[in-house]
Amino acid sequence: MQDQINDPDALTYIARRGVAPQWRLFLRAMMETLETHLDHGAREGLLRMVGARMAALMPLPACATLAELEARMNDTLAAADWGYVRLSFDANSNSVMLRHVAAPLVGTHADLTGAWLGSVLEGLYGTWFSHQPGAEPGIQVRRWGGDGGAMLLRYARG
């Protein structure tokens, strides 16, 4: 059903609902504290490490195809109520494009949209990809932008 939702406001609503009320205030306070005490680069790095740790706590099996990898990622994301991802290979840039929808969002005074979660997703997906057969060192997942309420990421060299 969520694949049929194209309204960015509806997707944002769904993503914000995905954060239990008892955690919303804590996460906002934590993120605002990080914003106050860490520069942008240090904060992004810390959040990527958090995502990498999450991936270590939710390891994926080795997958033979991109479709299988997407299915395993979505099974794991669903169990954590973290939305879902669509993977596609871009032959022009020799990269895998990720479209993550309905990530649990908590905004802060400096980041109303909760875009900070993109760094967590970079660490999560980067670690998952790095543990797959044939993964090469130096290939990273980085945010590519946004698309109608989704976070776009790219798995590519450099």
Image (tube, rainbow, N blue to C red):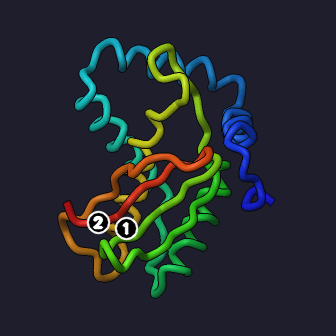
Residue under pointer 2? 156
Q: The residue tagged with tag 1: helix, strand or loop?
A: helix
Residue 43 image point, x, y percent: 30, 29
In the rendered image, the vertical position of residue 58 relative to residue 9, given as above or below? below
Q: Residue furthest right?
A: 1
Mark 2 vs mark 1, CA separation in Å: 11 Å
In the rendered image, the vertical position of residue 64 relative to residue 30, given as above or below? below
In the rendered image, the vertical position of residue 71 relative to residue 3, given as above or below? below
Q: Residue at x 63, y 26 (%)?
A: 23
Q: Residue at x 64, y 47 (%)?
A: 102
**Quadrant of the snapshot with the C terminus:** bottom left
- Specify the quadrant of the image occupied by residue 74: bottom right
Q: Is residue 129 left or right of residue 74?
A: left
Residue 107 image point, x, y percent: 55, 24
- Residues at marks 2 and 1 touching, judged by CB atoms closer than 8 Å: no
Query: How crowded is the residue under tag 2: few (<14 C-alpha within 10 Å), some, or many (20+)?
Result: some
Q: How many marks?
A: 2
Q: The residue tagged with tag 2: helix, strand or loop?
A: strand
Query: How crowded is the residue under tag 1: few (<14 C-alpha within 10 Å), some, or many (20+)?
Result: many
Disc 2 marks a residue whose amino acid type is Ala
- Specify the quadrant of the image occupied by residue 56: bottom left
Residue under pointer 1? 129
In the rendered image, the vertical position of residue 136 relative to residue 140, given as above or below? below
Residue 41 image point, x, y percent: 23, 31
Disc 1 marks a residue whose amino acid type is Phe
Q: Residue at x 39, y 52 (%)?
A: 144
